[in-house]
Image: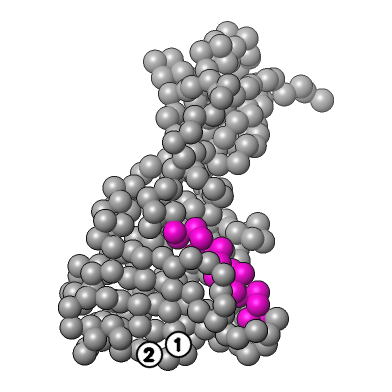
Amino acid sequence: MGNEGILLKFSGANLNIRSVPIYELGDTQVAVQRIVHKAFLFENSRLTKHAQLTQAERKRLSLQIHDRRKSSDAYALIPFLSDPICQQYLATLLKVGMETLAKYALQTVFSNKSKEGREETSINARDIEGSLFVGAIYAETVQITNHINNIGGVKSIELIPEGGLDVPPIKLTQETQKYVRDLPNQTFRGEPQEIIGKVTRLIPERLIAEIMLAPSRRVKVGLTEDAFLFVRYNTEQDQLLRFRGYPISRLGESPTAFREFEAYSVERVRRK
């Protein structure tokens, strides 16, 4: 097996005779590396707010510049370590990262399909197309596409698989940049889970119950009309309630740091 990696290619006027400015080059390469890091954290269920890699993990996941090609301005990125096992594992993370980044290039981040049987609440979040890793790399996608039509004259940025890496190439353009910039503050549903807390405030006009999960953490829970009436008239003050549903996250934020929740059921927590 050869060095599976990617060719990071910048295209634009005069980039066949001069390089991309060092800040735009370095910032883009750092974003690609961070996507690899996040893919590792996601695959190991560690993609939480302020998650950190160990020094050994960073070394194992590091990419290096293998060579530079002047057909435009292109840089071959391959694994830093020569260990075949590390190289193979890093290739799997590159594949995950590129397949996910491609959803931004293809403008298919959100699903247009409605979930059958789901009752609507006032929290109008959307469903991610594919895994929730799509939302986790939004900041890095912005970081990369910000260098299109910037001081370096870059018109497009391509990530092209090399060394047998089995994944389609990606081309990020001005259209991609516009699509990405139109996405801030878009909310999406996470994986189903349950939360338990006490109601601190009701917002009847929006069918929302604000609950306290911890002394310093409150979450707004969107409810169906029947569920809201149950909370309002059939529960006691300071009673613990269990809500089942979907945490609502924003693109670029950690899925564990959600401030809204869409509930499809609610019940009292029995006192022991």
Q: Which numbered circle lies on residue 98?
A: none
* Front one among 13 and 225: 13
| Quarter where residue 265 is shown | top right
At label 2, the amino acid type is: Arg
Task: Identify the image's colour scheme: rainbow, by chain, secondary structure or one colour.
Answer: one colour
Q: CA distance from mark 2 to mark 1?
A: 8 Å
Asked whether the beta carbons under mark 2 and mark 1 sit within 8 Å of each other, the answer is yes
For label 2, the residue is 68
For label 1, the residue is 65
Q: Secondary structure at mark 1?
A: strand
Residue 213 placement (x, y as % from top left) = 59, 36
Magenta residues: mostly which secondary structure? helix
User: Which residue shows up at 64% across the image and 60% down it?
Assistant: 43
Residue 36 placement (x, y as % from top left) = 53, 69
Q: Is residue 24 above or below residue 121?
A: below
User: Which residue shows up at 56% across the image and 74% down it?
Assistant: 165
